[in-house]
Amino acid sequence: MAEAIAEAKRCLNCKAPQCKKGCPIGNDIPDWIHELSMGNIGNAMNIINAKSNLPAVCGRVCAHERQCEGHCVMGKLGDHINIGRLERFIADFDTQMNLTRRPISAKTRGKVAVIGSGPAGITVAGELARKGFNVDIFEMEKRAGGVLTFGIPDYRLPGNVVDSEIEKIKQLGVKVLVGVTVGPDITVDGLFDNGYDAIFMGTGAGKPKALDIEGGDSKCIMQAIHFLRLASMYNNKVIRRRDIGLKTNSRVFIVGCGNTAMDAARTALRLGAQEVTVVYHRGIENMSALRAEYDEAVAEGVKFLWYSSIKSIRHNPEGTDYLLAMEVEGVVTDMPADKVIIAVGSRPASRIVSTTDGIETDENGYVITREYPFGMTTRKGVFAGGDVSGNQATVVHAMANARAVAESIASYVDAINLLRTIDQQ
Ligand code: SF4
């Protein structure tokens, strides 16, 4: 506490705060830092909550170096305010002390179904519940959180932190129904028949892209999102170590150089891989991973092959299970490998689109949304946001997009209810 307050006191409370400009959700950073500097943590939390439903998550996984902290004027003097750590402190303190009471607004404005409980779904649910809507979240997994629970390793974002954030959303009156897959279990039309005024698709992009090379269907290939999910299940004692499919002392190659690639590389090392090498077809200056994530991966022993790509994969008659034909800066050599983990992005699954009339997608499978009403798909009353609509970036970008869509859903539901009332008169 003393450390956090001392750090907050360094903030200049700038009149035109650059930190806020650097935040995709326009978090009122100086205002809550000022409250913290006076020890008013409840006030600080309320200010944060006006813009964010996931501060304990953002405080841990946001790209602070490129966003708020990267813009802080104190950084020009050599030592930016540690905004991410302060946000995390406030959110964790609030959770531990059960500090802020979340007023449950009267749910009079309408009923909204939210499909998916990742960052976009949680944001829409939280925003609409605060605005007076009845909101039910439908989550196909048995545990809520989506990519926050299954796509980010525990050492970066512990599962109990995500659970606490979801608990706070429930305290706003949101119902979370787990183990229900919209598509096979209940269709979008079925949801409308059950009285929902609008539906939000925040189903993410969980269908990984394949590796189009000779041997690209080898058993040694695994998708990073699948691997991270298995590692998370193992950490939560849902599966056994051997079910992950990664032998200890194995040689692992990771294809791709984003944050998911860093997560997969570090997780493989922590699971006992002997050597983990990231393979990237461009240079370090082009990687999409955060510098801090890269630095930590290097510190843990992850190796990097720049301007490199795997040309083919074949069985190895001796030693490791496979041989990779690896092209490094134009020269192809064989490299022994046991596992190749692919982290080159993903696209949306088509469970909802294929079971619903009228929701159109682009050629890559992303749901097409409109500018007005913002975020509405080609099907009236069905909205989408976050990764499923092609806004694939970071957790906070999905939140920023979802906040705007929530605003639009609120206006849409108000409008249709007004029309219904006029019709009845
Ligand atoms: Fe405080 Fe830095 Fe933001 Fe200025 S830019 S208000 S010093 S955090």
Image (cartoon, rainbow, N blue to C red):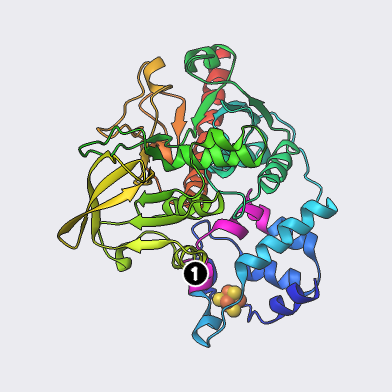
In terms of depth relative to the viewer, which is nearer, 378 or 236? 236
Residue 302 location, quadrant:
bottom left
The vertical placement of 406 against 352, above or below, is below
Q: Position of residue 23 (x, y in %)?
A: 51, 62
Q: Which residues are magenta?
A: 48-70
Residue positioned 29% across, 39% down in the render? 317
User: Which amino acid, mark 1?
Assistant: Glu
Q: Which residue is mark 1?
A: 65
Q: Position of residue 124 (x, y in %)?
A: 57, 39
Residue positioned 67% across, 39% down in the render? 236
The quarter of the image that holds ligand 1 is bottom right
Q: Is residue 199 magenta?
A: no
Q: Is residue 63 magenta?
A: yes
Whether residue 99 sits left or right of residue 319 in the image: it is right
In terms of depth relative to the viewer, which is nearer, 340 or 77? 340
- Confirm whether residue 120 shows in the render: no
Q: Position of residue 324 (x, y in %)?
A: 26, 47
In terms of depth relative to the viewer, which is nearer, 31 or 365? 365
